[in-house]
Amino acid sequence: MASLAAWRVTHLLQDEDGPWDLFVRLRRALGEGLLGKMLGCFYCLSVWIALPLAYWTTPVLAHAAIVWPALSGAAILLERLTSRPEPAVTWHEDPAPGSVP
């Protein structure tokens, strides 16, 4: 359950508009600063979302050190399974002016 929660909250903050465009406005307000960059990177954000989840779901605090990266990793795997691949970028160079194609 914590893995799903880590994916859901990370995806919501990083990639979704949210009600009344709340998360879009949050990302814009944070801009290019440290927090804004963190919200732009699913991998980075999943680490920080997983931290409190590991703490809350692990009865032995010492075990949270292994649960934390596991939750982040699970969120990343879920993101890779559910996201559409980005289209491949193709190289195209226009001929120089006056040259014969």
Image (spheres, rainbow, N blue to C red):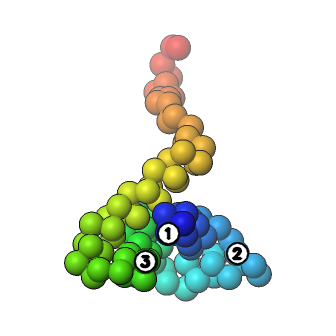
What residue lies at 33% left-to-right and 70% top-to-bottom? 68
Residue highlighted by disc 1? 2
- Say what amino acid the circle numbered 1 marks: Ala
Q: CA distance from mark 3 to mark 1?
A: 7 Å
Element type at mark 2:
loop
Q: Position of residue 83 (x, y in %)?
A: 58, 48
Q: Residues within 10 Å of mark 1 (few under 14, many from 20)?
A: some
N-term mark: 2 or 3: 2
Which numbered marker is on residue 18? 2
Identify which residue, 52 or 92, lies in the foreground: 52
Residue highlighted by disc 3? 57
Q: Position of residue 12 (x, y in %)?
A: 60, 70
Q: In the rendered image, which quarter contains the N terminus? A: bottom right
Q: Are marks 2 and 1 in contact (CB under 8 Å)?
A: no
What residue lies at 51% left-to-right and 14% top-to-bottom? 100
* Residue 42 in sight here: yes
Q: CA distance from mark 2 to mark 3?
A: 26 Å
- Say what amino acid the circle numbered 3 marks: Thr
